[in-house]
């Protein structure tokens, strides 16, 4: 642990223990530097980290304060169940569609949205790249690189893996129409109808829909709101049900925001390798970390090729371009072929624009800014939720991404809340759409990926009143 | 029948009957105008039509001549079988991939390609549209119109249906990643693994691959090289096997180039309507007609919504953009939902560019030019094939598209020919990849969508020598 992290932890502890209370002013950077015997820049980094975590807030020209209400609502508890579900055919897709269609049907405050604000992305810059690449495009490129995708884009993606310390050969990468297609192709490559797939509980509703549509059975494994899937239970489920695949989000899971610790990821990869079970790893939020560096995907620990890593540019760079990819390990050839017979190829202008953008630099600068924005928005939203939501509400504070997972008081019906919120111009994503058995009846996923405005604050207040 | 068509038929008959022989000079336009008592423009149109059909050729400053060799090779015979196959699980995908991968592995004369030359498309013009639309793009468009696609593009497509006399509401149209995704989604919407699908024989290899991958059984129905699927046999197969879907190409079928007459299409729609069997209609070549107007798809005669019409811009306007669509009749809602869970949406910049291009006009002008080019290339290729290929070769002369279907002498092994041609830098598409039972052993599909050059002529000559 670095010195500034130690300092941040010390300060956080003194807040937890009540020595500092919400609204208290922290000592100035100079005072703390002197009293602790560390450099001012160490203090600054510690304060910045605490601010990132929503523990303290900066007020212009006044200094740092313990965040208001940061203590009022508790974090989510560990899952009560430690057993996995029995393999079951799913029947939740219709409910998911009903909720999503109602949500899309009207203009509303988009707490239920799956997307961050499109205004957070360098759309104008990307536009210049697409304009210049498409005008210089060699027409033959439209019939080359079918299936696996644009060679230059794949090279840039491989390079980014390498920078993160992961060895992925260019030839392993298959460009897809967003991560959604990548995930579907991976699932199709390794399963047949009637097979069993292990998933987290709660899990992203689109995964449930894909599994249902493919005629597969799901086994749900409880997942901790901070550390992700329960690996003991996962191992039991593997041994008992011999699934043909598992499908997990290791980084900033949707909806919980959980981040699997590195040791968990290592064990996860050991387990799937030993049992020879393909791991479909959905890592679309991995770049949206608030910590110091990108949390590695499970793919980073995969030496035998059992991890099928899926990601995209849709959530971190180019929404609407529909460019994602998979690095599917030992299944690369199957994936390339499946891509050919599923949609032949991915839009060439979009691929070339991204390859050009990645080649010119600027992506990391954009990502830093995006992360910082999302982190600040998390603090702003959280403060309002802490202030307005009733006692008994519990909330995650994810270290990345743009979703809160909120447990409402026990008697709350999230589906009813979803309907009455919509009538008031507010969308939410109710818990039952994230579960094969329609559980999480008093849970919500709430999107903080849109700028915090007075309207947003009013909507949070209104929503809190509807909760009770 | 118009006057010039009558005249053209008269002249064609006198060639068939031997009154005019290959290489003979035709009377001048003025002479014919006088002798037949019709206007010079009627004669000109008749000659033009005959030229389009490859019956005569124009030589600069010399007039019109009966095409050389136009009589030497016979047209393909009707299929010998009039019975459909038994439902069978497919096992041809691996062979298709082997052939396609070998073909792509080296630079070669692309007779085996599925694409016309990318140089035939207005890539620069499209580039200007993509550049200007993407620079004015409202970022919110990236999260709106998910699933069904860009509203403006769908409006233009609905308008084009209307111009062709087909009523398709905008809401029925779902934009997809090319026709390939449209076809796959339609198949997924109406079948479950183990179901039976009726297909033509021969049929497009990608259809075979989709069916195999989806765990479906196929019943092959013989198809005539000129008029398409044998409808008596089709009806028998429906009654006997109660298939859950059929998948046909009604216009310029790949690989045969057959064009179903209007009366056939009407009967086809009556049959599927009476039996309530969804017809997945692959119409990607419909715009590439050499006749006077676009041949209607079966969709034009569908009043009950059983036809799922699939098409794209890939073969007629914008290769590589990967923008296709389906108008799936009564299955529109299922399709929209399937699209959401399969790939969420289609690339927004590509969709907007096409909407803008279609809005500005110029598409019909481009199509006229494209059709004319393909028609001329057909004549040029055909003349060379007629000249060089051995006796016993039989060949289609499709009224649109860019494929010849060639029956080689009986003892020819098309797969062996494919391999030895590749060694000589020539790709071909061998018959067995177009058949569930690996039939058509002495057939080839030959692409004439690339400009006719000395290299092409030399390759045709070389290929002919390899045949024997």
Image (cartoon, coloured by chain):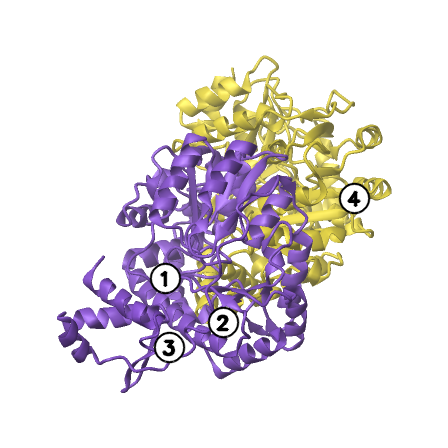
Chain colours: A purple, B yellow
Secondary element type, mark 3: loop
Q: Which residue is mark 1?
A: A129
Q: Nearer the viewer, residue B17 or A180?
A: A180
Identify the subunit bearing mark 1.
A
The mark closer to the camera, 1 or 3, is: 3
What's the mark number on residue B262?
Answer: 4
Per the model, the C-alpha gap separating discs 2 and 3 is 36 Å
Q: Which residue is mark 2?
A: B138
Per the model, the C-alpha gap separating discs 1 and 3 is 42 Å
Per the model, the C-alpha gap separating discs 1 and 4 is 47 Å
Instruction: Please check whether the numbered discs 2 and 1 fall on a single chain.
Output: no
Secondary element type, mark 4: helix
Does residue A428 lie above or below B233 as drawn? below
Q: Residues within 10 Å of mark 1 (few under 14, many from 20)?
A: many
Identify the subunit bearing mark 3.
A
What's the mark number on residue A67?
Answer: 3
Instruction: Please check whether the numbered discs 1 and 3 fall on a single chain.
Output: yes
Q: Which quadrant holds the N terminus of chain A?
A: bottom left
Does residue A39 lie above or below B69 as drawn? below
Identify the subunit bearing mark 2.
B
The mark closer to the camera, 3 or 4, is: 3
Instruction: Please check whether the numbered discs 2 and 3 fall on a single chain.
Output: no
Instruction: Please check whether the numbered discs 3 and 4 fall on a single chain.
Output: no
């Amino acid at each position: 642990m670095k010195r500034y992290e130690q300092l941040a932890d010390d300060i956080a502890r003194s807040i937890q223990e009540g020595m500092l209370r919400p609204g208290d002013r922290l000592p100035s950077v100079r005072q703390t530097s002197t009293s602790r015997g560390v450099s001012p820049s160490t203090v600054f980094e510690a304060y910045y980290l605490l601010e990132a975590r929503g523990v303290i807030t900066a007020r212009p020209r006044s200094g740092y304060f313990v965040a208001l209400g940061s203590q009022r609502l508790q974090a989510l508890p560990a899952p009560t169940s430690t057993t996995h579900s029995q393999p079951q055919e799913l029947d939740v897709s219709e409910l998911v569609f009903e909720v999503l269609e109602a949500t899309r049907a009207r203009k509303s405050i988009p707490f239920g949205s799956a997307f961050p604000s499109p205004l957070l992305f360098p759309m104008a810059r990307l536009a210049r790249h697409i304009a210049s690449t498409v005008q210089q495009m060699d027409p033959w490129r439209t019939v080359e690189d079918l299936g696996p995708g644009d060679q230059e884009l794949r090279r840039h993606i491989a390079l980014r893996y390498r920078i993160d310390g992961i060895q992925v050969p260019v030839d392993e990468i298959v460009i897809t129409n967003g991560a959604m297609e990548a995930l579907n192709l991976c699932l199709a490559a390794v399963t047949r109808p009637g097979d069993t797939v292990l998933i987290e509980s709660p899990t992203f509703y689109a995964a449930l829909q894909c599994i249902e549509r493919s005629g597969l059975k799901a086994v749900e494994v409880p997942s901790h709101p901070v550390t992700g899937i329960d690996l003991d239970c996962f191992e039991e489920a593997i041994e008992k049900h011999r699934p043909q695949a598992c499908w997990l989000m290791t980084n900033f899971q949707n909806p919980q925001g959980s981040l699997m610790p590195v040791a968990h990821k290592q064990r996860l990869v050991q387990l799937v390798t030993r049992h020879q079970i393909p791991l479909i790893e959905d890592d679309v939020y991995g770049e949206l970390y608030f910590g110091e560096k990108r949390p590695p995907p499970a793919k980073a620990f995969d030496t035998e090729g059992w991890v099928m890593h899926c990601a995209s540019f849709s959530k971190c760079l180019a929404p609407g371009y529909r460019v994602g990819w998979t690095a599917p390990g030992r299944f690369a050839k199957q994936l390339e072929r499946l891509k050919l017979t599923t949609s032949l190829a991915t839009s060439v202008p979009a691929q070339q624009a991204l390859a050009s953008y990645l080649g010119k630099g600027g992506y990391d600068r954009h990502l830093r800014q995006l992360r910082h924005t999302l982190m600040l928005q998390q603090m702003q939203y959280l403060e309002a939720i802490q202030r307005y939501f009733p006692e008994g509400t519990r909330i995650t504070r994810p270290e990345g991404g743009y979703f809160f997972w909120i447990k409402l008081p026990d008697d709350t019906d999230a589906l009813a809340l979803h309907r009455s919120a919509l009538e008031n111009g507010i969308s939410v994503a109710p818990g039952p759409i994230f579960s094969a058995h329609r559980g999480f009846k008093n849970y919500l996923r709430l999107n903080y990926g849109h700028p915090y405005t007075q309207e947003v604050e009013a909507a949070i207040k209104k929503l809190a009143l509807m909760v009770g």
